[in-house]
Amino acid sequence: MERRNAKRSPWVRVVKRVGLALAVAALATPVSHVAADPPTAPRWHVVVSTSPQIPQDVWFAGKGNNTDGWTSGGSICLNQLAQGFPHGEQVTMLLDIVEGGIIGQDGTPVAPGTYTFPGITEPSFDYDVTSGTSFYVILDAYIVQSNLDAFPQGETFTFMFMWDHDTGRSDRHVVLWLFFDGEFVPFLNEGTMMANVRLLP
């Protein structure tokens, strides 16, 4: 599946008078209740955020699978809590999960093997991508505001967080990938974060 950095429209739109009139007309129309289609497979429920007593710059949550899609939200805020950003808020990103699960079972966005992830305040870290063990979450990150040329406002980047899967809430060593030039490349050793992952009907 090809991913590219691309602009997308702002998520807030102005409601104009014509749209309001249509909405009022729609309210006057009888509504028949239709049940949503049930998921075709169990859904992952995922939360990733700060571990206790360890400052971090990431929070996101979502549920879904790679067949029926995902419902999610979250943010990355590059500021004094992030590695290498000591002077206030530099970048704010809004996150949407587009794919996730266990490597080899739900998808294989990268081949199994050992990859080295650079650190800034954290040291470099060698992570073993392992089928049946590594859990991944791919997110589109929309740049809401930015003071950095590397992350232009209005652009969308694709990241992948990865860690060793454990059901329930636990502190995990997390690594971050960046989708660049047609493939995921090691981007950052995130260090310890909190992950809460469950597979439910």
Image (cartoon, rainbow, N blue to C red):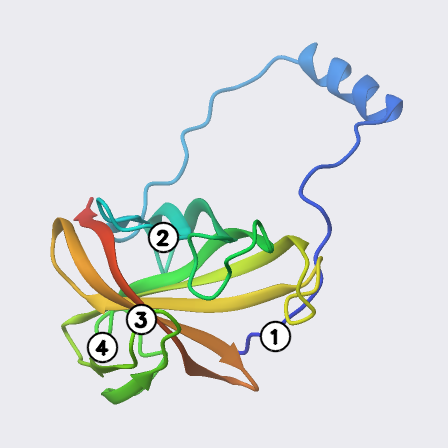
Q: Which mark is residue 122?
A: 3
The residue that disc 2 covers is: 56
Q: Which of pointers 4 and 1 lies earlier in the amino acid sequence?
A: 1
Numbered label attached to residue 4 = 1
**Residue at the spot 54% in from the left edge and 85% down from the top edge:** 182
- Badges 4 and 2: C-beta atoms under 8 Å apart? no
Which of the two labelled residues, at mark 3 and mark 4, occupies the earlier sequence position?
A: 4
C-alpha gap between disc 4 and disc 1: 23 Å
Gap in angstroms between the C-alphas marked 3 and 4: 29 Å
User: 72 or 149, which lies in front?
Assistant: 149
Residue 190 seen in the figure: yes
Q: Is residue 93 above or below residue 17?
A: below
Quick one: quadrant of the C terminus? top left
Q: Are marks 1 and 2 in contact (CB under 8 Å)?
A: no
Q: Earlier in the sequence, mark 2 or mark 3?
A: 2
Within 10 angstroms of label 4, few (less than 14), some, or many (20 or more) residues? some
Numbered tag placed on residue 104 in the rendering: 4
Label 1 crowding class (10 Å Cα cut-off): few <14, some 14-19, many 20+? some
Please name the amino acid that badge 1 sits on: Arg
**Kind of residue sitting beneath label 4:** Gly
Given this view, does label 3 or label 1 mark the residue nearer the observer? Answer: 3
Task: Report x, y in % for residue 12.
Answer: 70, 37
Q: Residue at x 71, y 18 (%)?
A: 26
Residues under numbered marks 4 and 1 in contact, where contact means CB atoms less than 8 Å apart = no
State the CA–CA distance, disc 2 to disc 3: 12 Å
Q: Given the image, on which type of amino acid does mark 3 rest?
A: Glu
Disc 2 vs disc 3: which is toward the camera?
Answer: 3
Look at discs 4 and 1 and give the one toward the viewer.
Answer: 1
Q: Earlier in the sequence, mark 3 or mark 1?
A: 1
**The disc labelled 2 sits on which kind of residue?**
Gln
Residue that appears at 61% across and 75% down: 4
